[in-house]
Amino acid sequence: MPVSHNHQSHAANAARNTVQNALMTMVSGTVVVGVILFLTRDFFSQLIFLSQSENPVRNVAVFAAIWLFTIASLKAVLTARRTAVHVLWNLFLTLVVFAHLSLLFILADNLTLFDIRRMWIERGEAGAALLFYWSELFLPLLIAVAFCLSLFRIRTWLLSRFRPSSSCVAFGLPAFVTGILATLVVMKGPVAVQGLAGIYTLPGFFSVILFEQVMDEQPDRLPVTAIARQPLVSNIIVVVDESVSGDFFGQGSDFSLVPVLKSHPDAVVNYGVATSAHNCSSYSNAVIRWGVAPGAFEQALHLPTIWQYTQASGYTSTYIDAQKPPGTLTNFMTTDELSFINQVKQLNVEQIERHQAFMRIDFDIVDHLVSLVADDKPDFIYINKQGVHFPYEGKYPASSTRFQPAMALFEPIGHSNRQALINSYKNAIAWNVNGFFERLLTRIDLDDTVVIYTSDHGQDLLEEGKGLLTHCNRNSGSAYQGMVPLMVLTTHQQLRQRFESSLAENRHQLSHFNIFPTVLEILGYEHDFVKQHYGDAMFYPVERLGKFYTSELFMPVHTQLDYEWQSVPLRTPSRLVPGALASQHAD
């Protein structure tokens, strides 16, 4: 009797374990399939598109074949003879899932090659992004861990029913699928991989970027052939701030966050809210330095740079970078471009939030300007300020918190109250930008010097945009990302009069594309030459562009179909002055 009872108990436990194992395997399979389908949300739309294409049978067959290779690669990984091969690919795919989901949650949009390339270009900001978006990583991390454990569980189930697969096949097949996707992108463009397995899309995009890095050959730039006549002033300074929105800078001549400018009306010509070239830092800076006209970006890598023009006109050029440590190039700066610059000053300060040296790095720029402007030779100086790039907290001392409630130090944007976010942003501008101009206006003689000031892009502070990105969002829907300040500082009487002669017509009308031709005319190049090749300078009435670009501008043809842009309505509301327009003049 006891034997029979034990046998029944053992059988019941075995049946219960079988059911539990089956349920756990089903749950694991659901997790894996669910994650793959979530990362491939355009599967059905792409299948419908291909079925209605010019050659539907061929296109759908290729689509299905790639999916079959994808499924085969996953089965090979799950049943790999060597456990080490499975662990390697399991951890790799888990990392891909974590990264892909994190980016999806932050962007609120499907990933594209442009998104990945943009992040590669701006990889130096990874630390700042982690501080600002860390709260958005928890759910992707949990899902990625569940995905990883589910793969292990499915492997156990498969190996109990199927023969192990070759370790060589298991190791090579996922790489082969990734290579297929990368090849499709290079040959047919990024749209060719829409609807294909999302777990391989991200590695495929990175493979394309690696291919471009290896194969990239920058063409030689054309020499300057135009002759510069008498320059208008001895010193030209172009200041490109970081992440300063035009509607927060002030209405007309009312600089509530930068009051030092209001105390120097004889030096400031404020053109109000301008439109940035792009909502990403690198592209906007490249447009300002390279002088490309809107829509003519195919010439960007061939035309002479601003450094070549300044050199040809007898100026000594200096590049001051407060964003990156020495030896680190950003904003599409290359060693070839550096060869045209007489001297480069990269301010070497470790980026530690709320550290005194870090918060005052833009103030140190003025120390370098004093010696440069004081010498007896003509100087052209291009400055990339540290500015108010996110996270905003840590960019100013706690004792300088003018607007409250503000965000806490290291508080992520996903947990922030919008008013606290805006207040922290205003505090950062009030400290950084006002402090910079306070030092510049008191220490730099502007009688024979002109300063052209703008920012690389504006900021979306959780208003109407998609996702959590404050800028550089491909489909943001927010005009604020392209709204920047644009003003001129000089006490040179004749030059100031020329700027003021167009002020009424050009207030809130200009864009980054007007800066390069303005610099050329100050250098002494003829107006007809400048207008023909680069468009209108700020001295003349300008037709408002009213849009900024959000897509690839300078990259290989396989990355680009049409230039994408976002309009900036003239009647966009101001976020600094509730009820007013960003383009409204001060009383």
Image: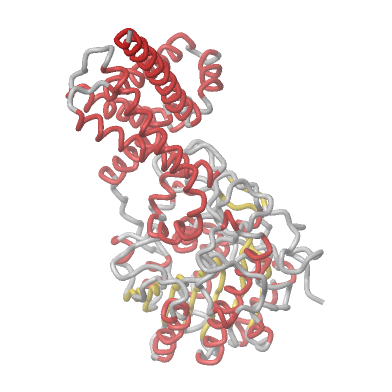
Q: Position of residue 126 (x, y in %)?
A: 41, 57
Q: Position of residue 97 (x, y in %)?
A: 41, 37
Task: Tell me if residue 557 can be seen.
Answer: no
The residue nearer to you, when weighing 13 against 161, is: 13
The residue nearer to you, when weighing 413 against 365, is: 413
**353 with respect to 273 (left or right):** left
Task: Tell me if residue 553 can be seen.
Answer: yes
Q: Quadrant of the C terminus?
A: bottom right
* Colour treatment of the image: secondary structure
User: Image point 42% across, 25% down: which residue?
Assistant: 28
**408 with respect to 380 (left or right):** right
Residue 480 lies, with reference to residue 184, above or below; the image says below
The answer to which image quadrant residue 399 occupies is: bottom right
How many dots with numbers? 0
Q: Position of residue 192 (x, y in %)?
A: 44, 27
User: Image point 30% across, 42% down: which residue?
Assistant: 210
The answer to which image quadrant residue 345 occupies is: bottom left
Q: Position of residue 494 (x, y in %)?
A: 61, 84
**41 with respect to 270 (left or right):** left
